[in-house]
Every structure is written in structure tokens, then in C-alpha cells.
């Protein structure tokens, strides 16, 4: 079945450090891939998405590239800020069940000033 | 401006006392979902509506029910909450073809 595996946290970085959160997936067909962010006490917000191989999603300085050959969708940011502290969820939806999302377990990110 | 609204944001109830959580949307999306999220875990899908068609996940306890009286509103009813039902409950919407679910801010439920 379809699944998402992401880097375990927590991840703690200093402000302005480079961020990578790894995400790999298993899916049949051609899934769409997402990163959602959840700030403390809030719901999930879509951060970025990519719907086909080699697509790059980007938003708020974050980027992720859909790599079909490595079944990966790693999240990166060149210079993190304290305000980026949150939980990040990698997720996929597959064409076969387009209305359902499968989430990874989440990675908690803490940024030190 | 808010697109998916959940009320209340915080709810405290007693063990066994029924509780209803509310979700409304201004997006006119045809699919609505309820998720349960326990601390530091991924959201777990409880059920969803595709228009008026109700779809229950196989492992959703019978204690959880839902109603969708119209396109805009969806309710989560917990008939006899247990301590293990303490969690954040998230509502989300989806429009077929958009490939994106839109989440509300969640209701944090505490069962005492």
C-alpha cells in the first residue's frame, strides 16, 4: 500500500542554518506530494506541493522537488528563522484515491535564536 | 476571510458526556473530512463525506458519528467520550480535481 516515511525529529537548528527534512514515499501510480506545516496549537496549512515528477514546489523560502527515481520529496530551506519552528508533515495522495491523503509521522523543527 | 471554520476552538467535556464539534466552509467544496490528531502524531482520518455520501474508515470507533446537513456544514458527534478521545479534531475540505485539502484551525478537545 501507499506510505510516507519522513525524518524523525525533533530537529533543532540555529537561526539562518540550512534545513533539510527527508521524505520518501511508496506508492503505485503517480501520486501528488505535499508538505504541510502545523504551528503550535493550530491546524495544518499547505506549505507546498508537486503533482508530477521533477516538479518543484516552493513557498516562503521552502522548496521540495518531486524525485521519482529516488521516490523522494525532501524539504529544504536555505536560511531558517525562529518563526519556522513548527511540525512539518510530508504527505501524498494517489490517483486511485485522490480524495485521501496519507501523512508521514511529522518532524518537529525548533529554531534557536 | 477564513475558509474552513471550526467551533469551538477549545472544548472541555466530562467522561461519557456527549459532545458535538462543528465545521463550516466558505469554499463550496464537495468533500469534507474529519481527522483526529493526538499529540505529536499525524492526523488520522475518521471519515469523510463526498457530497452527501458518508465514508467511514474501517477503524473509526462507533462512538464517533457525523452529520452533514448541507454543503457548508459538517458536525462530529462523540456519543460517549472516553479519556482516550482527548485530541485535536481537524476538519478539512477538498474539491475534486484540486489535489489539495484545506484544513481548519482545529478543535482541541479535553475529556476529563
Image: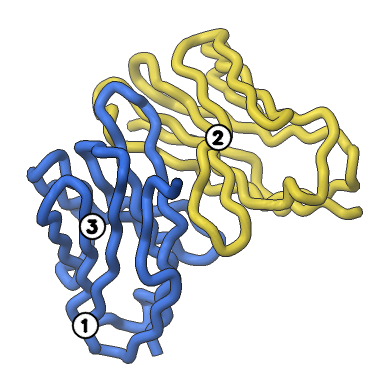
> In the rendering, at what x and y percent does residue B18 appear?
21, 82
**Nearer-the-camera pick, B92 or A22:** B92
> How far apart, in angstroms, are the residues tagged by discs 1 and 3?
20 Å
Circle 1 chain: B
Q: Quadrant of the C terminus of chain A?
A: bottom right
Please state which of the two labelled residues, at mark 1 or mark 3, is closer to the viewer.
Answer: 1
How many callouts does the rendering have?
Answer: 3
The kind of secondary structure element at disc 3 is loop
Label the yellow chain with its letter.
Answer: A
Q: Residue at x 46, y 57 (%)?
A: B105
For label 3, the residue is B59
Query: Marks 3 and 2: in contact by CB < 8 Å?
Result: no
Q: Quadrant of residue B16?
A: bottom left
Query: Marks 2 and 1: in contact by CB < 8 Å?
Result: no
Circle 2 chain: A
**Nearer-the-camera pick, A79 or A70:** A79
For label 2, the residue is A35
Please state which of the two labelled residues, at mark 2 or mark 3, is closer to the viewer.
Answer: 2
> How far apart, in angstroms, are the residues tagged by discs 1 and 2?
35 Å
Binning the other alpha carbons within 10 Å of mark 2 as few (below 14), some (14 to 19) or many (20 upward) gives: many
The kind of secondary structure element at disc 2 is strand
Binning the other alpha carbons within 10 Å of mark 1 as few (below 14), some (14 to 19) or many (20 upward) gives: few
> How far apart, in angstroms, are the residues tagged by discs 2 and 3?
25 Å
State left or right for residue B39 relative to residue B53.
right
Task: Tell me the number on the disc at residue B77.
Answer: none
For label 1, the residue is B18
Write down the colour of chain B: blue
Looking at the picture, does residue A103 appear above or below residue A10?
above
Binning the other alpha carbons within 10 Å of mark 3 as few (below 14), some (14 to 19) or many (20 upward) gives: few
Amino acid at each position: 500500500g501507499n506510505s510516507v516515511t519522513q525524518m524523525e525529529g525533533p530537529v533543532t537548528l540555529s537561526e539562518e542554518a540550512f534545513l533539510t527534512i527527508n521524505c520518501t514515499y511508496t506508492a503505485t501510480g503517480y501520486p501528488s506530494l505535499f508538505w504541510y506545516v502545523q504551528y503550535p496549537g493550530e491546524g495544518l496549512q499547505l506549505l507546498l506541493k508537486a503533482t508530477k515528477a521533477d516538479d518543484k514546489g516552493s513557498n516562503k523560502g521552502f522548496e521540495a522537488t518531486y524525485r521519482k527515481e529516488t521516490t523522494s520529496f525532501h524539504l529544504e530551506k536555505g536560511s531558517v528563522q525562529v518563526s519556522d519552528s513548527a511540525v512539518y508533515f510530508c504527505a501524498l495522495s494517489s490517483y486511485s484515491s485522490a480524495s485521501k491523503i496519507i501523512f508521514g509521522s511529522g518532524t518537529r523543527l525548533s529554531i534557536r535564536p | 476571510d477564513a475558509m474552513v471554520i471550526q467551533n469551538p476552538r477549545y472544548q472541555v467535556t466530562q467522561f461519557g458526556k456527549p459532545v458535538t464539534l462543528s465545521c463550516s466552509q466558505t469554499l463550496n467544496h464537495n468533500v469534507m473530512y474529519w481527522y483526529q490528531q493526538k499529540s505529536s502524531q499525524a492526523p488520522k482520518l475518521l471519515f469523510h463525506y463526498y457530497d452527501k455520501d458518508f465514508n467511514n474508515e474501517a477503524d473509526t470507533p462507533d462512538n464517533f458519528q457525523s452529520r452533514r446537513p448541507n454543503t457548508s456544514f459538517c458536525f462530529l458527534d462523540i456519543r460517549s467520550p472516553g479519556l482516550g478521545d482527548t485530541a485535536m479534531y481537524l476538519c478539512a475540505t477538498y474539491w475534486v480535481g484540486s489535489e489539495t485539502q484545506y484544513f481548519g484551525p482545529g478543535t482541541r478537545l479535553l475529556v476529563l
